[in-house]
């Protein structure tokens, strides 16, 4: 473009420009501390209305008092001075959304942070919205394939469900969520990963991992890092779910991960205390339950009449020393439709993912499980529970009858089969084959340390040789007698070649 | 007990002052100052006074308007501003307070309570800047 052309363009733009001067509500900064400003004036302001500061930063009015307004500042507050003019915008806090946001990383107010340039926004969505009502909803009936055997088999998750991932630090909570994202390739699912108060290095690693697995194409990352203001950490999950709603409104299925809501609650506690709201249990404000319930209620499955689509939520909660009876964990457990409980002990025993099958539940997911999976995994949970009990009992003596010994051996193999490496999601068909082989006793005479090898070999072998069975699982979600016969034969053939 | 805001204090002062004959006012003001001192509210006195002023104006149907401009505004413009503001705010008496401000470059800026109507060149240039730099 020549210089003349640019000048011409500018001239035209300027000629077309007309400044609309309106009466604006303006207040003054009275006090400023740690990302919170107390502002005088601003009469008629709405709750969670956006305000602008002279340096271009935005804020949100949270506390409306008789003669002042408590504003949280979204961004850098170091340049704001006492006495600065604060303008009300008349708009509730909103973020720009568009299809171009896929594959990008944005901050809590929807501004890209990945250095790939601006995102052309088509629309804006308010970040606070009332959750869809009863008439617009549909019960959960379609599965989310996480690719993690223990989850898909025992704690199945359906589209539109809210399944909590809870556990101590370093037990693989994030890994579980990332695996679930990686497995959504080709499953018609958009993923939103909301990182709240995480280290930027961790986020970078996750992004690189998703990029490597080809998952960024259908994923959006919303980040409010550990170095950013608490106000941003507070709004980040709402921003994430607004982006998810944008896609759901197009009838798409969305998976959203909040990593993690304990830090979100801490950020909200910080803001609340600075705004001088009265502290309650563990110094959290009284509305900390509502903080999470209104967020998680926005996960839903909508019926066709109202446009279809779903939002499945995986909130993550970090516990301290396995204490799930602390304030925030109990709150979120009661809001969600089940939890996946990860344990440090299991993790160090080498059982990874370290899911405690006994304490983990999925309250609605089983209706979403495919028939074939239901059939093979039906008794698995009970079997594992019995195994745990027997295992503890068997430690006291070696005189066990044959049936008990068999049960123990089967249990050991089940534990072994449910172990899974990180970043290695398994397809549903493969899971069905493996669990079929396990529950029908085909693995009973395979040495324990060869189970993984056997499993991997079987998956590969059966995919090429049990074509009818695979086709039935993919198309009809269930096998018939013909398919079962074929699979049995294939497993026997494979066993003969396996040493 | 609810916290007493400056607005409450101003309102209380106004209500008790309203029916007092002029002869009693000096004694009343002394009392007010004593009250403020006892309640440790003297540091808030400027704000309370400002609020008191607003309450009195509201009650008497007046609005105080601050007009800032680079040069002194001429009489006809002043009249027009007064007329239009009176119309806009429902026929109240307008008290103009003039203020010179070089930073506005040109035009003028009207402030009524917490409402600002900014006709200054500075504001227009800022709006143009936002318009031109905005990614559409």
Image (spheres, coloured by chain):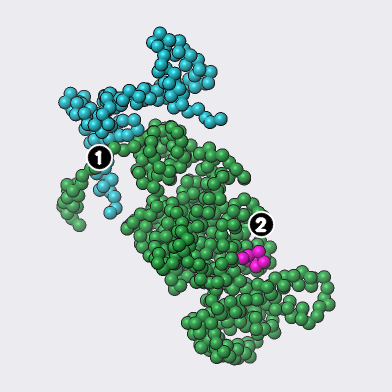
Out of A288 and A168, give the one closest to the viewer: A288
SS for callout 2: loop
Magenta stretch in the rendered image: A355-361
Q: Which residue has dot 1 on it?
A: A21
The answer for which chain carries disc 1 is: A
The residue shown at (53%, 62%) is A162
Q: Which residue has dot 2 on it?
A: A322
At label 2, counting other C-alpha atoms closer than 10 Å, the crowd grade (few under 14, some 14-19, many 20 or more) is some
The mark nearer the N terminus, 2 or 1, is 1
Q: Is residue A43 magenta?
A: no
Residue A340 to residue A91: above or below: below
SS for callout 1: loop
How far across and down, in percent of the image, does residue A382 sit?
Answer: 68, 73
The answer for which chain carries disc 2 is: A
Out of A383 and A416, give the one closest to the viewer: A383
Residue A36 to residue A481: above or below: above
Which chain comes out green in the rendered image? A
Q: Is residue A430 visible?
A: no
Contact, mark 2 vs mark 1 (Cβ under 8 Å): no
């Amino acid at each position: 473009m020549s210089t003349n052309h640019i000048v011409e363009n500018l001239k035209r733009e300027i000629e077309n420009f007309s400044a609309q001067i309106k009466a604006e509500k303006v207040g003054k900064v009275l006090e400023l501390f740690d990302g919170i400003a107390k502002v005088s004036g601003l009469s008629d302001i709405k709750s969670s209305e956006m305000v602008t500061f002279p340096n271009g930063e935005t804020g949100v009015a949270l506390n409306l008092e008789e003669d002042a307004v408590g504003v949280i500042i979204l961004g850098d507050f170091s340049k704001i001075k006492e006495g600065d003019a604060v303008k009300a915008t008349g708009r509730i806090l909103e973020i720009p959304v568009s299809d171009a946001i896929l594959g990008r990383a944005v901050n809590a107010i929807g501004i890209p942070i990945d250095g790939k340039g601006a995102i052309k926004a088509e629309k804006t969505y308010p970040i606070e919205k009332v959750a869809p009502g009863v008439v617009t909803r549909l019960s959960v009936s379609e599965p989310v394939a996480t690719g993690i055997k223990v989850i898909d088999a025992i704690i199945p998750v359906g589209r539109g469900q809210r399944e909590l991932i809870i556990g101590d630090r370093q037990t693989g909570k994030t890994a579980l969520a990332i695996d679930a994202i990686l497995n959504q390739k080709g499953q018609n699912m958009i993923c939103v990963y909301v990182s709240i108060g995480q280290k930027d290095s961790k986020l970078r690693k996750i992004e690189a991992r998703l990029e490597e697995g080809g998952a960024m194409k259908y994923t959006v990352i919303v980040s409010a890092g550990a170095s950013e203001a608490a106000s941003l950490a507070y709004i980040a999950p709402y921003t994430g779910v607004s982006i998810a709603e944008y896609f759901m409104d197009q009838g798409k299925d969305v998976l959203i991960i909040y990593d993690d809501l304990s830090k979100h609650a801490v950020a909200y506690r910080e803001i609340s205390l600075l705004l001088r709201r009265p502290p309650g249990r563990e110094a959290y404000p009284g509305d900390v339950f509502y903080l999470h319930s209104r967020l998680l209620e926005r996960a839903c499955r909508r019926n066709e009449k109202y446009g279809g689509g779903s939002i499945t939520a995986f909130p993550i909660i970090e516990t301290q020393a396995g204490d799930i009876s602390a304030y925030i964990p109990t709150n979120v457990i009661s809001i969600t439709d089940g939890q996946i409980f990860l344990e440090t002990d299991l993790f160090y025993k080498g059982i990874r993912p370290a899911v405690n099958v006994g304490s983990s539940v999925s309250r609605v997911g089983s209706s979403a499980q495919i028939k074939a999976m239901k059939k093979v995994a039906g008794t698995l949970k009970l079997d594992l529970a019995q195994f745990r009990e027997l295992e503890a009992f068997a430690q006291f003596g070696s005189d066990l009858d044959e049936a008990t010994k068999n049960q123990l051996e089967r249990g050991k193999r089940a534990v072994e089969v449910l172990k899974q490496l990180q970043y290695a999601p398994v397809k549903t068909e493969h899971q069905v084959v493996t669990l079929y082989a396990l529950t029908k006793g085909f693995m009973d005479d395979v040495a324990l340390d060869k189970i993984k090898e056997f499993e991997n070999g079987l998956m590969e072998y059966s995919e090429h040789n049990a074509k009818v069975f695979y086709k039935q699982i993919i198309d009809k979600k269930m096998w018939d007698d013909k398919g079962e016969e074929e699979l049995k034969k294939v497993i026997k053939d494979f066993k003969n070649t396996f040493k | 007990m609810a916290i007493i805001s400056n607005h409450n204090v101003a309102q209380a002062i106004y209500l008790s002052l309203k029916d007092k004959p002029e002869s009693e006012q000096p004694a009343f003001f002394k009392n007010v100052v004593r009250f403020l001192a006892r309640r440790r509210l003297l540091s808030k006195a400027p704000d309370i006074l400002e609020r008191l002023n607003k309450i009195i104006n509201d009650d008497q149907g007046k609005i105080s308007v601050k007009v800032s401009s680079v040069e002194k505004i001429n009489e006809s413009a002043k009249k027009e501003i007064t007329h239009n503001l009176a119309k806009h705010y429902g026929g109240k008496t307008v008290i103009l307070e003039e203020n010179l401000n070089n930073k506005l470059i040109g035009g003028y800026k009207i402030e009524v309570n917490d409402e600002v109507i900014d006709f200054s060149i500075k504001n227009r240039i800022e709006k143009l800047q936002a318009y031109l730099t905005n990614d559409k």
